[in-house]
Structures are given as C-alpha cells and as structure tokens.
Image: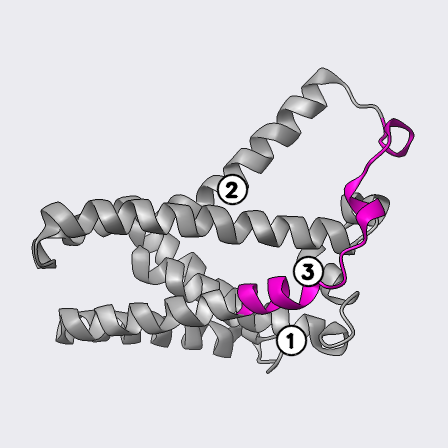
Amino acid sequence: MMRQSLSIMALAIVSNLNFIFPVDPLMGKLIATALILLFMLLHLRSVEGGANFQMLITIAKIIPFTLVIGLGIFYIRGENLVTTASSVSPIGIGASLMALLAGISATSWSYTGMASICYMTGEIKNPGKTMPKALIGSCLLVLVLYSLLALVITGLMPFDKLAASGTPISDALTYLPTLGGIAGIFVAITAVIVILVRSQAA
C-alpha cells in the first residue's frame, strides 16, 4: 500500500509540473520513477539529511498558505460569509450525508502524517517529551492554518461560484489582484510542495 501511494504521489507531482512544463506521458513516468529513487536514496544515505529535507519542504508548504491568507484577508467580503436560505439549493438527507463524508475524508488527509511520524520514534532524542509536543503542536498548526484558509477562500468568492467550483483555491486566487494572473501556476507549485511533504511522510 505504501509503495502504491508513493507511486501515485510521484505521478501527481509530475501531473502538476506538467501544467508549467508540458512533457509527454512516457517522460512523465520516467520522471516519477526518478523522483521515487531520489527520495529513497536521500533517506537511505542519512536520517538527518531526510529530516532536514522534510523540514525544508514543510516550511515551503506553509509559505504559500500564509501568503494566500495574509493577502486574502484584506479582500474578504462580508456578504460572502453570510448565506441565506434562498441561495442554497435544497438537497436530500442522502446527498447531505454523502457531502459530509466527502468533506470529512478530504479533511482527514491533512492529519495522516501524524501516525507516520511515530515510526521514527527511535531516531528522535527524548521522544517521551518531544513526540507529544510535536503531535499536539502540528495538529493545532494544521487546524489553524486550514481553518483560516477556508475562511479566506469563503470570504473571497460568492457562495454560488464557490459551490459550483471544482478548484476553489485557484478560482479564489483570481479575486486577488496580486495573484490573479498567476493563479494556475501558483496552485500547481503549491500542489507539488504539498505532495512532496506527504510523500516523505509515507
């Protein structure tokens, strides 16, 4: 399962990079294979080197989110945060439950790395104190970061457009004067970084 997920994530990285640098399918698969081998060699060579790389890409992941939040908070429109009953199409209980489950599934993806870090307890100094602080701190950081991101995205876009959007973050960026022109590239690069972080956790 882990090998399959790594393969999928490597292909996803290439797919997002393809938005910026188009390549043919065969070359994309070769690049994905090279990425898997590169990550493997990095961690086999040195646990410390792998940890430093993980720290670097984690910081790189947080930067785009904080940038969107920091800029977007100044462009939030209060009326977008207030939804009237007439603006919401009525749906059945079954559809509501499926939407809730889909949201929970997508949200839980943000916390999957917490279990993986426990596998490296033996490599951590004073794990009895370090691990609880790391797990609780990372959980709170993810909670705050994604809650603020959801608030900003919801405040930027009108509700009907947000509900109909298949790519809400990239669509919301078009409402930011500073990022609107490079929304696609910005999201593609951010997606690559996010997948890199997840691949290291796997």
- From what the image shows, is residue 102 above or below residue 94? below
Q: Which one is in front, 60 or 37?
A: 60
User: Would you name the residue on which mark 2 appears?
Assistant: 107
The magenta region covers 64-89
- Dot 3 or dot 2: first in sequence order is 3
Q: Position of residue 61 (x, y in %)?
A: 46, 67
Alpha-carbon span between mark 1 and mark 3: 21 Å
Q: Is residue 87 magenta?
A: yes
User: Would you name the residue on which mark 3 appears?
Assistant: 73
Q: Position of residue 26 (x, y in %)?
A: 50, 75
Q: Which one is in front, 113 or 157?
A: 157
Mark 2 neighbour density, 10 Å: few (under 14) some (14–19) many (20 or more): few
121 left or right of 65?
Answer: left
Say which amino acid is labelled 1: Ile
- Dot 1 or dot 3: first in sequence order is 3
Q: Which one is in front, 27 or 162?
A: 162
- From what the image shows, is residue 97 above or below residue 41? above
Q: Position of residue 83 (x, y in %)?
A: 82, 36
188 left or right of 129?
Answer: right
Q: Position of residue 53 (x, y in %)?
A: 29, 73
User: Would you name the residue on which mark 1 appears?
Assistant: 185
Secondary element at tag 2: helix
Mark 1 neighbour density, 10 Å: few (under 14) some (14–19) many (20 or more): some
Q: Magenta residues: mostly which secondary structure?
A: helix
Say which amino acid is labelled 2: Thr
